[in-house]
Every structure is written in C-alpha cells, then in structure tokens.
Amino acid sequence: MKIYLDVCCSNRPFDDQSQTRIRLETEAKLVLQVEAGESIIELR
C-alpha cells in the first residue's frame, strides 16, 4: 500500500498536544512511520 502524506504531518509531533485532534493526528502519523519502517506500508 502506498500512502502519500503532506509535509506538514512531519511536524505534528512538535505541535501543541493539548488539543485532541492534534494528538490523534500525531498518533496516526507515528503509527504510519512505524509501519513504514517495518515495510508494512510504503511512504512516498
């Protein structure tokens, strides 16, 4: 599976995590990063 992410998602972990939406987006980004490292998905 190929996943295309906006460059802004790379900075999400550095944003204010007190907002639920930002925290969830950060968690999703980190899961995708781990899955890419394990060759489950391919990031482009």
Image (cartoon, helix red, strand yellow):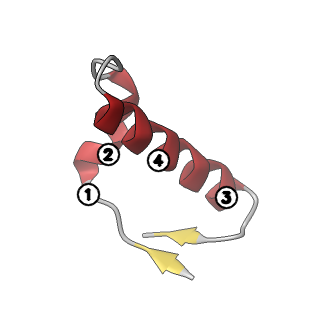
Element assignment for label 1: loop
The residue labelled by disc 3 is: 35
Q: Residue at x 66, y 49 (%)?
A: 34
Compare residues 18 and 3 and report the one nearer the observer. Answer: 18
Q: Amino acid at mark 1?
A: Asp
Compare residues 21 and 2 and report the one nearer the observer. Answer: 21
Disc 4: CA contacts within 10 A as few (<14), some (14-19) or many (>=20)? some
Chain-order first, disc 1 or disc 4: 1
**Where is residue 5 drawn, in percent x and y?**
34, 61
**Where is residue 22 drawn, in percent x and y?**
31, 34
The residue labelled by disc 1 is: 6
Seen in the picture, residue 19 relative to 2 is either above or below; the reply is above
The answer to which quarter of the image holds residue 11 is: top left
Element assignment for label 2: helix
Q: CA distance from mark 3 to mark 2?
A: 15 Å
The answer to whether the residue labelled 4 contacts the one labelled 2, judged by CB atoms less than 8 Å apart, is yes
Q: Amino acid at mark 2?
A: Cys
**Where is residue 9 drawn, in percent x and y?**
32, 45
Q: Amino acid at mark 3?
A: Glu
Q: CA distance from mark 4 to mark 2?
A: 7 Å
Chain-order first, disc 4 or disc 3: 4
Element assignment for label 4: helix
Quadrant where the C terminus sits is bottom left
Q: CA distance from mark 4 to mark 3?
A: 10 Å
Q: CA distance from mark 2 to mark 1?
A: 6 Å
The residue labelled by disc 4 is: 29
The residue labelled by disc 2 is: 9
Disc 3: CA contacts within 10 A as few (<14), some (14-19) or many (>=20)? some
Tag in front: 1 or 4: 4
The answer to whether the residue labelled 2 contacts the one labelled 1, judged by CB atoms less than 8 Å apart, is yes
